[in-house]
Image (spheres, helix red, strand yellow):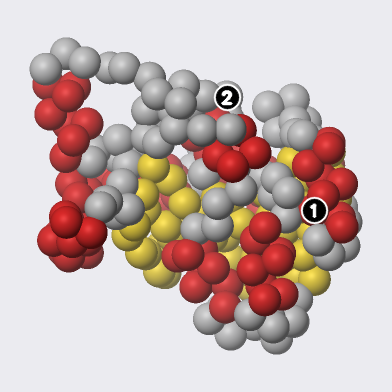
Amino acid sequence: MPIIEKYSNINPKILDFILFSNIDTPSILDVGCWDGNLGKALNYNKFKCYIDGIDIAKEMLFKAKKSGYRNIYHIDLNQVSISSIKKKYDLIILGDILEHLVDSNKFLKDVSSVLSKNGYLIVSLPNVGFIKYRILHVLGKWNYTETGIMDKTHLRFFTLGSMKEMFFRYGFNVIGQKSLCAVPFAFWYFKILGKIWPSLFSLQIIFKLKRVNKYET
């Protein structure tokens, strides 16, 4: 899959969380915004907001700017803290970001500096506990791929339990959770099982998080 196509997809569950956030004209920070397709989707849905974007790829940021992003930040979050941005946002979108960071724990410590008092994080993470990979790992297979849960660019891997434990440790409560199981239609029952048993049957889990207290030391 070409890299441009790989990072241009819009997560429909993230979009739902934004569209039904019940915040009047929110300010949004799209972390890892790539070419700005999330902003395009919000504009298509006539959702009024102010959206800024962060990405490591400067050429993609210029495309996001043309797509209506207000401010763009060329930042490598493995080198520069997100706290370098001196603004506050109502919604911060982390669409498949934490698994690419060398120190995702430090990121969660720092992200509060740009989150408004009543703001929310919307986070999507791939679930390495998905049944397919549990079976493969038991068989001793840990093979990286170009895309998906075993993407070769992933630096960290999460199960549903470790996701929630990480959020709680750094002072965030889960106030909304959705499952995504993008399997062929023939396996429609996986989508039902994903809602019932997300730790085993969800390829990706999407959270709405609210800051409630200081992180544990």
Give the tally of numbered discs. Answer: 2
- The residue positioned 74% from the left and 81% from the top of the image is 48
> Which secondary structure, mark 1?
helix
For label 2, the crowd category at 10 Å Cα-Cα, with few meaning under 14, some 14 to 19 and many 20 or more, is some
Looking at the image, residue 199 lies above or below residue 121: above
Whether residue 105 is visible to the viewer of this picture, yes or no, is no
Looking at the rendered image, the disc whose residue lies closer to the viewer, 2 or 1, is 1
In this view, the residue in front, 99 or 185, is 185
Which amino acid type is shown beneath numbered disc 2?
Val
In this view, the residue in front, 78 or 192, is 192
The answer to whether 127 appears left or right of 15 in the picture is left
- The residue positioned 13% from the left and 61% from the top of the image is 189
Quadrant in which residue 190 is drawn: bottom left
Closer to the chain start, of discs 2 and 1, is 1
Quadrant in which residue 43 is drawn: bottom right
Residue 125: image location, x then y, percent: 43, 46
Residue 72: image location, x then y, percent: 85, 50
Q: Which residue is mark 2?
A: 102
For label 1, the crowd category at 10 Å Cα-Cα, with few meaning under 14, some 14 to 19 and many 20 or more, is many
Residue 64 disc label: 1
Q: Give the residue at the far top of this rendering.
A: 140
The answer to whether 172 appears left or right of 36 in the picture is left
- The residue positioned 47% from the left and 51% from the top of the image is 124
> Which secondary structure, mark 2?
loop
The answer to whether 88 appears left or right of 99 in the picture is right
